[in-house]
Amino acid sequence: MALGLSKNLSKSGIVTPGIVTDSLVLKHNYSAGSVVPISDGAFYFNNSSINFGTSIVHNYSSGDTAHTYSFWVLRETSPIASWEGLISKQGTSGYSWIVFNSDSSAPRLYYEGDTNSKFAYVNLPVMDKRWHHYAITANSGTVTMYQDGVALSGDTSIDVDHTVNCLGDNGAGSNYFIGYMCNVGIWERVLTQAEIKDIMFKNYAGLTSSQTTNLMHWWNLDEETDTDGTAGDGGVKDSHGTNHGTLA
């Protein structure tokens, strides 16, 4: 399992995460120009995933619908050969995903519910081996997706439940995301575009009190911890809640 642990990088200004291998040897310092995550490191996914014990459920039928996902990723391969799971429901053969896919030769970001009959998607203007920030908001079945703070057009409606508790694959140990991820946040409210543009350049410590309003979970993914979020190994810490992750 490879995890970014570059604790000696400067915390001031905009920094790129340092990535290390299993032997804790520096692998790369990535530069993405003016668009880079604020983080001391990033988790490297390659036939690996992070599982959370408690499912996060957004139930459209009950009206409990307002939520936002926010995360940074750097894909190691390009173009997309198949579909790659970013956030998913563990222990299933599919469905309830946030995935990258390529349809009609266009890279897309999909947001799918607990059945494969209802999903939203947008075409991505950029899909390369650089850091990009993504945000997805949903309320009353209306979905808005962002890349690097820019709202994208596409099929943006969904009316089925959405359940997740896994990062990095389709929830069933396949269709792995190959690349790096950090600063994953989930809110029980819709963030405005202005908030998304501000939050994308912050790690958990940099969030203001208003930005943590209705925040459910935040995983910096910049260090390995015990599975309970304390010092150790085998897991990652939920900085805002108690849904710590287990490396798989």
Image: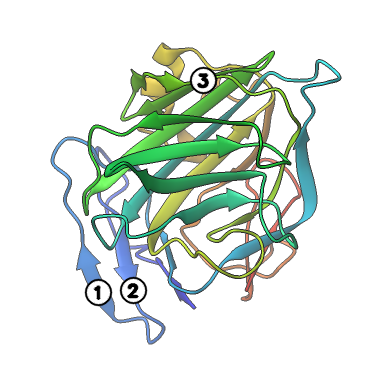
- Mark 2 / mark 3, whichever is N-terminal: 2
* Label 2 – label 3 distance at C-alpha: 37 Å
* Residue located at (27% from left, 47% from top): 131
Name the disc covering residue 156, or none: 3
Q: Quadrant of residue 69?
A: top right
Residue 20, relative to residue 220: is it above or below? Answer: below
Which secondary structure lies at badge 2?
Answer: strand
Task: Please give left or right for residue 163 compared with residue 208 in the image.
Answer: right
27 on left or right of 114: left
Q: Which residue type does callout 1 highlight? A: Lys
Identify the secondary structure beneath mark 1. strand
N-terminal of the pair, mark 2 or mark 1, is 2
Q: Which residue is found at the position 66% from the left and 42% from the top?
A: 116
27 and 62: which is toward the camera: 62
Whether residue 209 is visible: no
State the colouring used for the structure image: rainbow
Of mark 3 and mark 1, the one earlier in the sequence is: 1
Are the residues flagged by discs 2 and 1 in contact, CB closer than 8 Å?
Answer: yes
Can you identify the residue that label 1 sits on?
Answer: 27
* Residue 64 in the image, given as x and y percentages of width and height: 80, 20
Q: Looking at the picture, which amino acid does disc 2 mark?
A: Val
Report the number of discs.
3
Near mark 3 (Cα within 10 A), the count class, few <14, some 14-19 or many ≥20, is some
**Can the viewer see residue 61 in this picture?**
yes
131 lies left or right of 237: left
Q: Position of residue 34 (x, y in %)?
A: 16, 35
Q: Mark 2 or 3, which is nearer the eye?
A: 3
In the image as oriented, which residue stretches furthest toward the bottom? 23
Label drawn at residue 20:
2
Amino acid type indicated by mark 3: Thr
Nearer the viewer's eye, disc 3 or disc 1? 3
Residue 173: percent from left, percent from top: 61, 70
